Image (cartoon, rainbow, N blue to C red):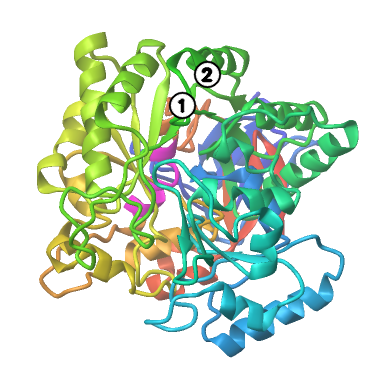
Amino acid sequence: MPPSADLIVENASILTMDPDNPRAEAIAIKGGEIIAIADRATVLEHKGPGTRVIDAGRGSVVPGFIEAHMHLFGGAAELDHLQLMGVHGFEALSDAVRHYAAMRPDLPILQAQGADYTILSATERVSRRHLDRILPDRPFVMAAPDHHTMWANTKALELAGLLRGKQLGPGNEIVMGDDGLASGELREGEAFGPLIALAGEDRVWLGQATGGEPDPKPTPAEQASDRAIMRRGLEWCARHGITSIQNMDGNLHQLELLSEIQAEGGLLCRVQVPFHYKNFMTLDMLDKASMMAERYKGEWLSSGMVKVFYDGVLDSWTAVMVEPYADRPDWLGEPLFTPQQFIDLAVAVDRRGLQIAVHSIGDGAVRAVLDGYEAAQKQNGKRDSRHRVEHIEVITAADVPRFAKLGVIASMQPPHPPGSMGLPLEPTVSRIGPARWPLSYAWRTLKNAGARVVFASDWPVSPIDPILGIQAAVLRKPWADDDPDQSFSLHESLGGYTVEGAYAEFMEHRKGRLKLGFMADLVVLSADIEATAPEALHMVRPVTTICGGKITYQA
């Protein structure tokens, strides 16, 4: 007699992502694993007196979404900030900020997210004087969607000790005005980090800012507060059908918080947290990365990765280019590591058997990181390392085939190209210049060249919703008629959020597909995703998220 299932999902249009059994009508789960996936009659043989049955209403059932690049802790904290995506013009900005301020009279510093670089207009850059006109008496700061630039009013700059400038490391800048005072624009983490500390969220972004631990150690109340933030982020992920997270900033504090949540039975997603190596560190500090990898290596909570930033972003001219910016012909960007420093780092990390993931947006950064990976192979010997390059917003033709040759994963974000998901084209397309447009956000070009391409949102840089990311990948349009089509099919896009995500963390034998013996990580959708017009994909919503056989979200 077939074993009795804990849970059955039936009356479904199941896309398994398993080429040996691509479709099914029902799925049975027991002990956190899939025990049957077939036609409805066969699966219902596993129905027992204690089996819970979910009717999918002929909606699609797909593998749980694997978010391959996000910032869980910081994104969770920002859920309470003012959200400015879609806000344009001074009056609209003023109304939004003043309303938010009136609703939160006791916040030490008011924070906003998602302010486009062109939030005022296509030509006028934000300054502290604009923000002073809106809110002169309370400290206020707002961040660009990419989280690499912030703008602050005078009150905030004074409180943070930034109004008269400050000496910073490479790639970071407090933009100064003609009056010798800070203009209000702050580029990269060293510049705006003091403002985050003023807001009391320095622990939240430590994994990004320094890769270090809270000092002093959090009090029990602070630890409980941090756990609550992290729980809110996990709930937000589950609500969007996410069952696995590859976090892209990290420290031991985040792993300990997640471990405590797991002990309480509240870990709603599987989470990988890296060690974040910064350019002020020394190679012996990789001992901590190895320790984290050894201590956390379960199917729910793991480490084993070293995250690095090589450059910044295009919009603030901090991405590193091979040729100068189209709108700044004397500037290539300033790398956070010299090429040799990164080679030494890549060799050292690879020798420890750890995976590397490097933020590399400009084509100069992409090339330097690939050079590091190539050097690691030559010195340490070739292995199945699956090192990653994150973002790859611009690449040269010469570097495209190197991904497949070196076995490097291209980690890319469908919501990021200008013109996608409501993002303005400017200033980014002018920064890049038409000559480089054909190899910008070049998902299809890389895939056709044999690269493994994994998709993600980079939340909170972009909205977390994987379905919106799938839609963005399917609807992607060239910026010029003679540019190549970089769009993906529905199935390719879905694979970018499932199959490829599992491969990126060496777990393709356990998740990313729906098949016998695999983890019971899946999401029931509100409609048949294959029968939905691409323009309407955003209407398809997760109805039930199941992770490890447990329901983590239900609409």
Quarter of the image holding residue 338? top left
Residue 236 placed where, x, y %? 67, 53
Q: Secondary structure at mark 2?
A: helix
Q: Residue at x 73, y 29 (%)?
A: 215
Residue annotated with mark 2: 289
Is residue 522 visible in the rendered structure shown here?
yes
**Res 236 visible:** no
Q: Which residue is mark 1?
A: 306
Q: Nearer the viewer, residue 18 or 395?
A: 395
In terms of secondary structure, what is the magenta stretch mainly? helix
Residue 1 picture location, percent across and down: 65, 23
Q: How far across and how far down the image is residue 173, in percent?
A: 45, 53
Residue located 43% across and 16% down the image: 283
In the rendered view of the protein, which quadrant contains the C terminus?
Answer: bottom right
Outermost residue, front side = 180
Vertical arrangement, residue 340 with respect to residue 377, above or below: below
Front in this rendered view, residue 144 or 518: 144
Residue at point 21% right, 20% down? 375
Task: Say which residue appears at 31% left-offset and 46% top-offset.
Answer: 334
The amino acid pointed to by label 2 is: Ala
Let me know if residue 379 is in the magenta part: no
Q: Is residue 131 above or below residue 462?
A: below
Q: Position of residue 280 (x, y in %)?
A: 47, 28
Magenta-colored stretch includes residue 497: yes
In the image: residue 57, left or right of residue 500: right
Mark 1 residue type: Val
Q: Residue 73 is drawn in which quadrant?
A: top right
Callout 1: few (<14), some (14-19), or many (20+) C-alpha neighbours within 10 Å?
Answer: many
Q: Quadrant of residue 499?
A: top left
The one of 242 and 2 positioned closer to us in this rendering: 242
Under circle 1, the secondary element is strand
